[in-house]
Image (cartoon, rainbow, N blue to C red):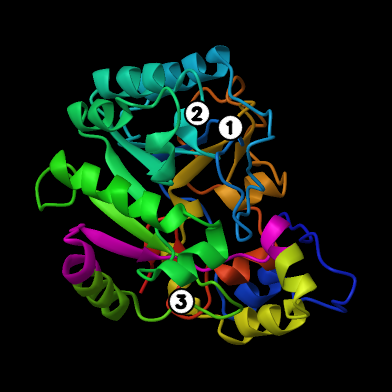
Amino acid sequence: MPAVRVRLPMALRQVPQFGQKLADHGIDLRRTATTTLQVNVGKLCNQACHHCHVEAGPKRTEIMPRQVAARIVELVARSPGITTVDLTGGAPELNPHFTWLVDEVRRLGRHVIDRCNLTVLFEPGMDDLAEFLAARDVEIIASLPCYSERNVEEQRGHGVFAMSIAGLRRLNELGYGTGGVRKLNLVYNPNGAFLPPDQASLQARYKAELADRHQITFDQLFTITNLPIARYADYLDAQGKFDEYMSLLVTHFNPLAVSGVMCRSLISVGWDGALYDCDFNQMLELPLGAARTIFELDSVDLEGESIATGPHCFGCTAGAGSSCGGSLM
């Protein structure tokens, strides 16, 4: 299967090949039926977090044009197997075609996820964004790397925690995270060179802390391992911890997590329409083998196709495993 080297710091001497690790365990990693189309609608963001594998920020100019968004709608319409369209970025809501895309996908009866950083709800021109999402029952997966102000601001910047709490309160008022149809899930990313703790235990702690301190409720917590690519790789290298972190991922490889990795049932679409096996491969520009762009893909029937891998894949299979939907085990 195809392989790629991660953009590694010079200090790293050697990284085991993920494909060889699979072979050592007798695992043939291939795609199953595609159920999710994850769409990166652009790298523009109102934040610039140091763990961001997209390297998103306020100065990024990559934005999905209407032509690509329209092609996505066409493909979804022709593909009843796609049950979920997962919109990500950057801050996906900053794309000028975001609301159009949401409306068109919901018109087709498919589930929509918005990966929201919460602070975007208070950006100029976004006054009715929360109400828009609620009216269409869009699931919100919101980044909140900790329930403590100090840890959040260490990772995401001054003032982000208070604004995030305000965003969560606003969503609760609209019926999000209260056990009904409007799902509000949170995402935890470690703020150091370590694996996430047990997801169930941390979720219980999040629920208790946010309820007691801020009267906030949510549905689920997803723990996601930081992958050693792009901005996070630079952060690790600056801390002198890149080799240590890669060693941690490799030594905690869990073959039981492989069956649940998101690349088996997900297709990732870049802002320019390029296709990938997952969002991380997208950032490494490691293309999908079956087709290069959404304009070449006539069907999402890719079952049995091989999946492009690299050393970064150890991040998704370390410990309890990790995906965009949290822990795999």
Q: Which residue is mark 2?
A: 94
| Residue type indicated by callout 3 | Pro
Q: Are marks 3 and 1 in contact (CB under 8 Å)?
A: no
Q: Are marks 1 and 2 in contact (CB under 8 Å)?
A: yes
Check the picture and name the quadrant holding the C terminus.
bottom left
| Residue type indicated by callout 1 | Gly
* Mark 1 nearby-residue class (10 Å; few <14, some 14–19, many ≥20): many
Q: Which residue is mark 3?
A: 196
* Mark 2 nearby-residue class (10 Å; few <14, some 14–19, many ≥20): many
Highlighted magenta segment, given as a residue range: 210-233
Q: Is residue 261 visible?
A: yes
| Disc sitting over residue 42 in the figure | 1
Q: CA distance from mark 1 to mark 2?
A: 8 Å
Q: Give whichever of 135, 104 is nearer the camera.
A: 135
Check the picture and name the quadrant holding the N terminus.
bottom right
Residue 126 lies in what quarter of the image? top left
| Residue type indicated by callout 2 | Leu
Q: Is residue 107 above or below residue 248?
A: above
